[in-house]
Structures are given as structure tokens and as C-alpha cells.
Image (cartoon, grey):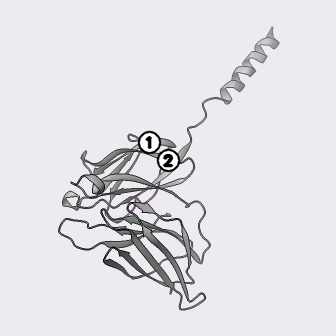
Amino acid sequence: MWGVLSLLGLSVALSGCGSGGSTPQGRVRVINALTNVPNNANVDVNVNNGQATSSNIGFGTANSSAVTVDAGNVPVSILSTGTTTTLAGPTTINVAQGADNLVLVTGTSGTTGATAPQVVRLGQVDLGNPPVSNQARIYFVNAAPGSADATFNLTVTNPNGLPATSTATATALAYPAMSAPQFVTVVDAASTVSLTVTSGTETIPLNTTAIAGGNTYAVVLFGRQTSTSTGLTTQIVRLNP
């Protein structure tokens, strides 16, 4: 009898060990490209009904670190920082398991149709495998509401080594969308970056700036931040911590 009871207890213990597995999860990184927000307020991101939040994301920037949530279809809402005022969403996005998912909040506040505020999952970005120390991974993103297809030309100039120049390009990138990743060689700290973006009849330059090897970046075309500003803007946003 004691033997039977022992076997039953062992069976229950083993069945308990095999059940209740953890829910698969993925990571979410958010870029704020929402234009014409009242008072130029920053935004808060609410993922999966409060399972994770990112606060106070400024225009032209990303949350400082990815948030981890349940994988699968989850709602994302964008609010004006420190308020309950919803600026975009809730929108259901599919969070890929075990991956870094790049999400864009874009559009023009107060408009409808093609330029209306929206939450877009651009796709997966590879942050788990950093590039080698003398290379940078580049994703190009058209986040400018109502813009024409954009062409990006990025050149790294390496005065102290070879190659002397290294380039990455994306042609006719529609809004809102992200290119496949490309790699540029960055020899050392003296290497510099020049970027020209063309959208329709506008050419949007970026002042020479430095990027570092071993990192992953989004090179983003942003829309007009307010109704009174003119011209589009570009920004290089580092995605890895």
C-alpha cells in the first residue's frame, strides 16, 4: 500500500513539473514620430493593457530600452505623457517571440485618412547579435506622414583606414516602412557620416555626425513636428542599449 501511495505521489509531482510553463515573450522598441502633438508633448507607450509601459519618449527618439511583453497579438496605445489622453491606438500588433520588434508611432495629430495617427509594427530588428566592432548595422525608416517615397544615401568616411568610404542606400521607401538591414564599415572614432534623403522635390540633409561600430541604428525620415514648422527632418537613432 505504501508503495502504491509513493508511486502516486511521484506521479503527481512529475505532472506538476510538466505543467504551467511560462508564456512566450518578445521585446518591443518604440520610435516616436508622431507630429503636431499639442504643446509638442512627449508620449507614453502602453503595451498589452499595462503589461509594460515606456514613458516620456520625445519626438525623434526611441524608448531608452526595450520592454518585454507576452508574444502574439497585443494592443498598443500611445498617450500624451503623464495624461490619459490617447493620441494613437489602441492598435493590435503581433509581437514575435524571442525577438526585438520595432514599433513606430507616426502620423499627424488631429488628421484623418492616410496621415492619421497610427501605431505600426515595422518588423524585427536584430539587436541580439551585435555587428563586429568595425561595422554598424543600419535600418532606414520613412516615418514622415504624407511624404513621397524616400531615397536614402548614407556615406561613412574613414580618414584613417580602409575602406576610405562605405555606403548604404535605400531607394523609393514608402511611408511608413523600414528597409532591410545594411552594414557600413566604421574604422575608428575619426570616421564621420554624411546623409542625404530625397523625398519628392525635397532634399533633407543631415549634418556630419559620428556613429560607432558594433551598434545598430535606425536612420529615420521624420515629418514636420508642428503645424508651423517647415521641412522634413532626419535623425540617426541608436537601437541597441
Let me know if residue 82 is in the magenta part.
Answer: no
Question: Residue 223: x and y, percent?
Answer: 30, 66
Cα–Cα gap, marks 2 and 1: 7 Å
Verify CB contact (< 8 Å) between mark 2 and mark 1. yes
Q: Nearer the viewer, residue 38 or 202?
A: 202
Question: Residue 192: x and y, percent?
Answer: 47, 84
> Mark 1 or mark 2, which is nearer the start of the sequence?
1
Label 2 belongs to which residue?
A: 95
- The quarter of the image holding the N terminus is top right
Q: Tell me which secondary structure the magenta stretch mostly adopts.
A: loop
Label 1 belongs to which residue?
A: 74
Q: Is residue 146 visible?
A: yes
Residue at point 40% right, 58% down? 63
Direction top: furthest residue? 1
Within 10 Å of disc 2 (Cα), the crowding (few <14, some 14-19, many 20+) is: many
| Magenta-drawn segment | 62-67
Question: Residue 60: x and y, percent?
Answer: 34, 66
